[in-house]
Amino acid sequence: MGFGKYSSSSKISALVVDDDTIIQKIHKALLTKLGLEVNVVANGKEVLDLYRSGTSFDLIFMDMEMPIMDGPEATKELRAMGVQSIIMGVTSRDLDSEKEAFIASGLNDCYMKPLTISKISSLLQELMKKN
Amino acid sequence: MESTLHQQISAMKQSLLDEGFVDGHFVELELLEDGDNLHFTEEIITLFFTDSARLIVDVEKELNNDPIDYSKVDKILHQFKGSSSSVGANRVRLQGTKLRESCKDGDVEGWKAALKQLKKEHATLKEKLDTYFQLVKQLGSEKKTMWHPNEGQVDMLAKNQLMKMAITKDEKVEFGHKDMVKKGTGKEPGKVVTEEEAVKVVSDEESVQMVAK
């Protein structure tokens, strides 16, 4: 774990993509507390800009609805670029159809907001098993 | 032995949970506090109240337009739902949902009543949490911790004394270089627990237990 260029250490690198300042802070604090190295951007275009500049992350937590470029569009673009990072969708939308459409854009999975210690701990456990 | 102030804070938090003012997401915010971020919860809640007050003003403004753009109202209330859910503002979130449903139904009398109630819930929660954080600040000046083995509970700890751990309910999670949680074997009541000795165990039951290594 922790092979993302963003991470300067052996820590897992994570990117929080959300236009909501409160969510940015909560998710950053949560992921940092669980030992990840975390960066934050406010929309899908900023993620693409980072990857095009050569930066990459082990984990991306992608909000669904954002201005400029939303989660589904950014995810499709990243996958089209050949990005292999784990991309977890994060949404407060209830409808299964909306979540399924988001997942279909190229996500590894989708969570309801907000992320919790329990959800991320389970995710990290799964990742460690695979590695 | 628990201080009176700590008991007061615990009782108040339990009451906020029992009465549905806040839910587990609020408790989880407090679990994210540590030495670098001792007032994280208060910071987030303050942001929430600033943000949500603005959203309520925006939604009222839209609802006073003629004709009403209900899609715009829905967008604002969706955002409101997201942020109130994230901070565990349970009753405020539920009332926001009621308002949203009334608007979707085009029920004018319904949304007028729901909006009024939303403002009331919002103000009530703010008042309660302002009181809560005042008490927490008072307690925060206390650096020592007391561990009472009989109760299995601990007085409020200065967050910077806790090791960073995360476990799922009834399971112990090991990831990275973090050590497994060990149950404490007990100490004399009143013994001060130092940073080196302290391990914080967090469960989904929202109870915080301090155990000794």
Image (spheres, coloured by chain):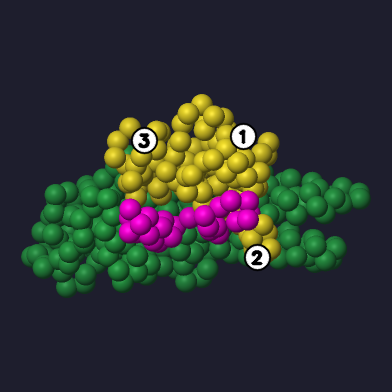
In this view, which residue lies farthest toward the top? A53
Taking the magenta stretch, the answer to whether it contains residue A110 is: yes
- Would you place residue B179 above or below residue A96 in this image? above
Display colour for chain B: green
Apparent side of residue B9 relative to residue B182 in the rendered image (left or right): right
Q: Which residue is mark 2?
A: A96
Q: Secondary structure at mark 1?
A: helix
Q: Which residues are magenta?
A: A102-131
Q: Quadrant of the C terminus of chain B?
A: bottom left
Q: Horizontal and vertical percent for residue A109? A: 53, 57
Give the amino acid type for the residue marked by disc 1 in the picture. Lys
- Give the drawing colour for chain A: yellow
Does the rendering let one see residue B204? yes
> Mark on residue A45?
1
Which residue is pictured at 13% across the width and 54% down the height?
Answer: B197
Which amino acid type corresponds to the residue marked 2 in the rendered image? Asp
Q: Chain of mark 3?
A: A
Real-space CA distance between mark 2 and mark 1, rounded to the nearest whole angstrom: 25 Å
Residue A7 is situated, as x and y percent measured from the top left of the image, at 36, 35
